[in-house]
Amino acid sequence: MDPPSMLDAAQRSDAAGPTDMGADPRDMAPQDPDARVTADMDLESGPDGMLPAPPDAAPVPDQAVLPPPMDAGPQIEGVANNECAGAIRIEADGTQIIRGDTSEADATLFGIPDPGEWGPDVWYGFVLDATTEVTLDIVADGDWDTYLFVYGGGCDGLEWVAENDDANGAGLNSRLTQVMPRGRYAVRVAGFDEDEFGPFTLTATFSEPVAFDDAIFGATHNSYSGGARRSIEAQLDQGIRLLEFDVHDDDYQNRGDFRIGHERPGDEVDHNPPNPPDDALTGWLLTVAEWSLENEGHSPITVVLDMKDNVANNHRFSEGNLAALNNKIAATMDRQLLAALTVPPRGGGWPSVGELRGRILVVISGDEASRRGYRDDEGFRPAVALNTLGHVVEVHDDGDDTLWYWHGRYASATDTVVWLNHGRYDTGIDPAVAVDQNGVVVEVHKHQGRSRLYYRVGRISEDGRGVDWNSSHDYDDGILPTIQFIGPSRVREIHQSQNNRQRWYREGVINVVEGTIDWQAHGRTDDAMPDKTQAQASINGRIRRVEVRRRDADNRLRYRTDDGPDAPIQYPQLAFVEGQQGDDWIGDDIRFFAAESGGEGDEFLREWMNRGGVARQWHYDEVNPDLVSQFPATNVPFAQWYVDHLEALDAVAP
């Protein structure tokens, strides 16, 4: 799977309701580690995973009955609930099982959320007298394709709340779970199109919501090691809902995958079936994802990737950098993934456990450089370029004479940049960059020790995996180089003399195949030096601008657009980042925390749990009387004391 598909995973919107929580390409604004989410989002215009609040529902009348009918027209004989006005009342208490049939019904045509071409439908309704977690599960007799809608208010003023097609991609049936406030609701069971209809079973469950961060889950440490832990499938069958994999990048370039193991790849890894037969991370993640698909409606699973190597320092995708890790997460988790970017910052509230059923969360743990590098980037003297296709290229030096770049795409709907790829490309300082409409990239920089200038020609790769750079070439003496395209395959470079403030220019023609520039005109100039920190291009008929900067307080790289937020340059936040003891950079975007059970670890976790964090204790191999976190991760999940302990804690059921 290539990075464009990874981008799809980060941006996906199925418009299918709260159990289909992918992220939308329009809302791929990177999360700011130092700012809380303040914008309201909804399922129609924001990421599905944001779990919107339903529309304000009408107050419950003294006599809790469904609202009076609207002018719905004649009813079909034998199908009393063919229209909203004839909706069958569901008692909002416990679990209710109702048989229904759309075979003889009509299709309702009205614009909530759009008329569409849905199949025949029937209607139900319920009244909530308090905030309630509602699960609606439609199972068709046979293989017809169901579609489920929920509306708030009365039949004469319905407001869309949620919808679902294929139960998060698990089949043709429909299922959604959502926390709904006090009020009146209508349920519409339809076919996906006019040829889809038939009998079905509707199961409606009403319960008090439990937020994810208020729940306790069974968890294991070094989950791949077998022995007392048994297989991954056995752990999941038992109700374990946090798994930890130790991840190494050894020989990624030849293998094309990360590998799991304790101290080294393969160390303490149990390959006995049904565990995967090798150490490749992909197989272990797929084991979890496939179990998830086969066990529809399971309580949420958290997968911790404990990075044993500094993946952030890998120079390119092919070497196993964080872009490659993001790609693995997206490729294996697919629609089950709850992307971190769809969840509010710590303290902003979590979805309920019920709303997260069928979902998988991924957490990056372990090596600090990897955790921090996934979250944001440090750099100096940044420069940026933008082309008419929305490709964005940023370059900077790291303060240690090494040059790095970011490649991303401009998201016009939200005026944000989706930063997809990151890599090292040279040594030097003071870089500048330009990119044309064909994806040809030209970069210039100064030598780190001399006043010698160099250039590189590259091209945005066809597979989306960053920039393919050619060799570096020196071309002049000077400082503070800049570069711009002035025509097809033509560039103009301006720099300052190393001896005085005189500016000089060069113009040249690019040989893309050879990766060289034929420099032609050359001389003094009074032209102003272009501002390399800003770029603009006409995208879909509108001028778009991107500006990059270094934040003085911590040297973190930031960007902004004309109408978008000031935000960090960072990977699409598919995974959550874990905070650990000793981290001095924890912001509100850090929601997960981990430490060894007991002593100072408990003190660290207690502090962050009190501040809204979700905690994991590893080596939880005996009852800890001082602290129980959301994830007491043990090495002995089948030991009777642990089973009894989870039951006593009222841990989340499978």
Image (cartoon, rainbow, N blue to C red):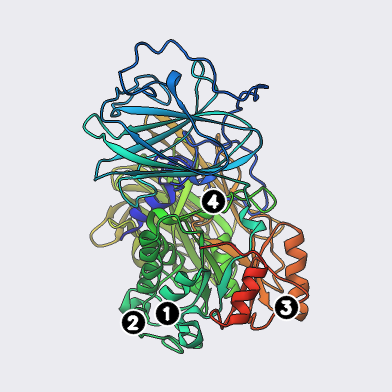
Which of the two labelled residues, at mark 1 and mark 3, occupies the earlier sequence position?
Answer: 1
Q: Are marks 1 and 2 in contact (CB under 8 Å)?
A: yes
According to the picture, the residue beneath numbered tag 3 turns out to be 624
Look at the numbered disc 4 and give the secondary structure of its residue.
loop
Instruction: Give the residue at x 29% y 53%.
Output: 510
Residue matched to label 1: 231
Cβ–Cβ under 8 Å for marks 4 and 2: no
User: In the picture shown, does residue 129 fall above or below 647?
Assistant: above
Q: Amino acid at mark 4?
A: Gly
Q: How far apart are the alpha carbons under marks 2 and 3?
A: 33 Å
Q: Identify the mark nearer the N-term, 2 or 3.
A: 2
Q: Which mark is residue 494?
A: none
Residue 90 position within the rendered picture, expressed as x and y whole percent measured from the top left: 50, 33
Instruction: Tell me where residue 347 appears, x and y as whole percent.
Output: 70, 51
Q: Earlier in the sequence, mark 4 or mark 1?
A: 1
Mark 1 to mark 2 CA distance (whole Å):
8 Å
Distance from the alpha carbon under mark 4 to that under mark 2: 31 Å
